[in-house]
Amino acid sequence: MTRELLLGTAAALLIAVPASALTMTVLDGERSIHAFAAAGEDSEENSDFADAPSFDSEVNAHAMELNPELQFGDADTQHGYGAWASASAGQSSEINALSIGGKGFANASGSHGDITLTSALGDADLGPGGFEANASSSIKLLFKIDEAAAFSLSGFISAGIEQAVGLGESRSGSIASVFFGSEDDETAIFQREVSEDGRKFDEEGVIEAGNYIFSIIARANVFGGFFPDDLIGDSDDTQHPDFGYATGSDFNGLLELRPIDKPIPEPVTTSLVGFGLGALVLQASRRRRA
């Protein structure tokens, strides 16, 4: 009987602490790419999105004024190369059991073309000689974890900027951003945004069980919809050179989650506990024999 008790005690002490059951579940969001281009009355638009854990895709859009004869106001028809626009976006990303990661890019470019102007084109969003191109690549996901976890977030974001002549910043330029935060209490754990710059990031920490948002985005846009009066001047026959604009942004990011190790008894401590229990069992056995 004593031998059985000792063996049972030793077996109980050798049982390993159960491994963590940390799980990550994606609740909402998407991974997508988009490209749009317009020049004069010509336009093209393409997009794609992830419908599986792995996503690897690229889209393009191109547009060009088809009519080389451009009419401006009451002036006679003028001849020249028309405007053009081009956009492209791509992404390679993947969702694994405890990680979300990927890289993406967005590029946009365009030109008014080599045309002769006799008056301003006015305030129309897009007219003869005008162009617009925009592109985006984005990862936006809402997920939950069922217990506290350690996280690491690493990668980089970069974006350039190129503005068409005479137009506001809101219609032209590129931006890249990364965000990681709690949806439950609406707080940011880490966030960065760049324009005409590039940044690396490498963050670590611990988060509690709950719902979280992770997004990393690259956007690019150029717009040349009209010519301002001060650019054209007072001449009835002002030659506008072939102005071209190009901008782009990209990202590469990885969010990883790890279970938090639970403390287990040290081997020496476990042995002492075993010896102590064994001694008690032997003492009790001797008393029964006496």
Image (cartoon, rainbow, N blue to C red):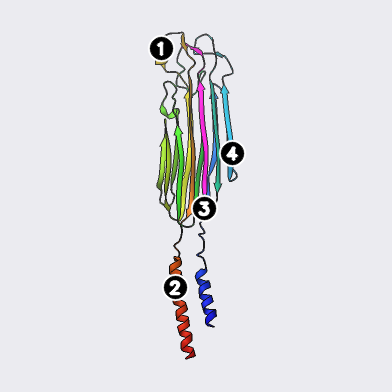
Expressed as whole percent of the image width and height from the top left, the position of residue 85 reads 53, 23
Q: Are marks 4 and 1 in contact (CB under 8 Å)?
A: no
Badge 3 amino acid: Met
* Mark nearer the viewer, 1 or 3: 3
Which image quadrant for residue 272? bottom left
- Circle 1/circle 2 CB separation < 8 Å: no
Q: Provide the residue designation for mark 3.
A: 24
Q: Callout 1 environment at 10 Å: few (<14), some (14 to 19), or many (20+)?
A: some
Give the residue type that dot 4 points to: Asp
Extreme bottom residue here?
290
**Tag on residue 273?**
2
* Image mark for residue 56: 4
User: Label 1 belongs to which residue?
Assistant: 233
Q: Which residues lie in the magenta part? A: 99-118
Q: Amino acid at mark 1?
A: Gly
The residues tagged by marks 2 and 3 sit, at their Cα atoms, a distance apart of 37 Å
